[in-house]
Image (tube, rainbow, N blue to C red):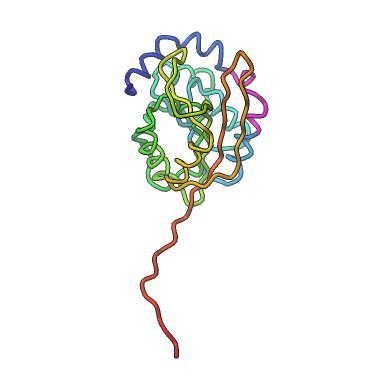
Amino acid sequence: MNLEQVRDAYASVTGLYIELFGTIQQVHADDLAFIGRHLSIQPGEVLDAGCGPGHITDHLRSLGINAMGIDIVPEFIAHAKAAHPTGEYQLGSMKRLDVESHTIAGILAWFSLIHLPPQELDGVLAEFRRVMTPAGTLVVGFFDGAEASRFDHKVVTAYRWPVDEFSERLMQAGFTEVERLHRPGDGTHRPYAAIAAVMRQERAEPTGTRTCR
């Protein structure tokens, strides 16, 4: 599965996707509270990576957050610009962000990592870390499962993750979990989870020691 396949799959169902999921009223209030709680805690730009129709980006802006949305699907970006004309939306890939290093205070990846095969996740997390400021915040939403495995998503193949395993991957990428949210399946929706994490500051190695006698 490559990004071009994901882009083309979503482009083919853009209208239906926007109808079903493209307004802020269709996002659970607890999810919005979780997102807002972690991405409004410090000044600076927030990147909504995989913003889709742009409704959550617009919600972040309504909270006073300087948010910008990016997505690989041109139809989503066109809709976001038309529906939310005061916002900033750009075509772009999470694998190669067109952003200078250490300039982004927060990143939201709300179900936008679900189509990445497990072996590609670490590379995207490393790219997130590259662009984030020290102590920047990452909020990720994803489908929960007993093991990391693929499943037949209605649009295109997706992957579910055990929450603890996803948290471990975040830690290996240089992030420390600060809060998680879990919502079990209800017969209509699959179980899913969200994790908020902050960049972990690596300690500088000592250049030498001095012994006093």
Q: Please identify the quadrant where the C terminus is shown.
A: bottom left
Q: Looking at the image, which is closer to me, 10 or 57?
A: 10
Q: Looking at the image, which is closer to me, 211 or 12?
A: 211
Q: Quadrant of residue 121?
A: top left
Q: Position of residue 101 (x, y in %)?
A: 38, 46
Magenta includes 27? yes
Q: Position of residue 99 (x, y in %)?
A: 38, 40
> Mainly helix, strand or loop, the magenta region?
helix
Question: Which residue does the image show at 36% across and 14% down from the upper left?
Answer: 8
Question: Which residue does the image show at 50% across and 20% down from the upper left?
Answer: 53
Q: Position of residue 202 (x, y in %)?
A: 44, 57
Q: Quadrant of residue 73?
A: top left
Residue 203 vertical position relative to residue 132 in the rendered view, above or below: below
Q: In the drawing, does residue 34 fall left or right of residue 125?
A: right
Q: How many marks?
A: 0
Residue range (magenta): 23-33
Magenta includes 13? no
Q: Position of residue 77 (x, y in %)?
A: 44, 21
Question: Which residue does the image show at 39% across and 19% down from the upper left?
Answer: 74
Q: In the drawing, does residue 181 fall left or right of residue 205?
A: right
